[in-house]
Image: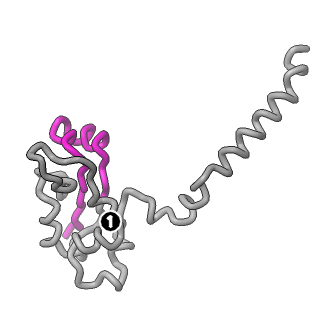
Amino acid sequence: MRSFRRYAPILCALSALLSLACASAPGASARSNSNERVSDVITEQELADPALAGSSTLEAVQRLRPRFLNQRGAGLKGKDEGPRVSVNGAAFVAVNELAHIGIAEVSEIRYLSIADAGLRFGLDGTMGPVLLVTLRRR
């Protein structure tokens, strides 16, 4: 019991310093204030923006989250084809196929990193990032 009293002030000071360091980490406030821009999900509410009316899903992704379409490195064939797309969890299609899907049909677009895609799709998902497009139910 005596040893705890001896170290209690040091532990309290250390705890306070750690909480201050976490609260003032660079970008901490930016993430909470503009969460929709940092997020790996484009929601139905974002797609309902009147500025996107008449756009294809590909155009909406280019405007809302252009980083979804960036891919580092080249594919197996030496071409940088961008992320692959899975619509409602089906087989992969090229990202250009998003141009044929109207945003009114989409409920969510989720970016899956290589690690997340691997967990969801197994070995097929380890070939690069995936855009998981969920269509509205009719």
Report whether 6 appears left or right of 97.
Answer: right
Q: Identify the image quadrant of the C terminus.
A: bottom left
Give yes or no for residue 66 being in the magenta stretch: no
Of residues 133 and 10, which is closer to you in this image?
Answer: 10
Q: Residue at x 16, y 55 (%)?
A: 81
Figure check: 127 above or below 9:
below
Q: Residue at x 31, y 54 (%)?
A: 111
Give yes or no for residue 127 being in the magenta stretch: yes
Could you tell me how many numbered marks the image carries?
1
> Magenta stretch?
110-138
Question: Crowding near pointer 1: few (<14 within 10 Å), some, many (20+)?
Answer: few
Residue 40, picture quadrant: bottom left
Figure check: 53 above or below 132:
below
Report whether 89 appears left or right of 112.
Answer: left
Residue 98, picture quadrant: bottom left
Q: Residue at x 65, y 45 (%)?
A: 22
Report whether 23 appears left or right of 34.
Answer: right
Of residues 123 and 120, which is closer to you in this image?
Answer: 123
Q: Residue furthest left?
A: 77
Figure check: 102 above or below 7:
below
The colour scheme is one colour
Position of residue 26 measured from the top left corner of the image (x, y, whole percent):
60, 53
Position of residue 54 measured from the top left corner of the image (x, y, whole percent):
23, 84
Report whether 134 appears left or right of 100.
Answer: right
Position of residue 19 measured from the top left corner of the image (x, y, whole percent):
71, 43
| Amino acid type assigned to the residue bearing label 1 in the image | Pro
Figure check: 97 above or below 114:
below
Q: Secondary structure at mark 1?
A: helix
Q: Identify the image quadrant of the N terminus.
A: top right
Q: Residue at x 38, y 73 (%)?
A: 45
Say which residue label 1 marks. Answer: 66
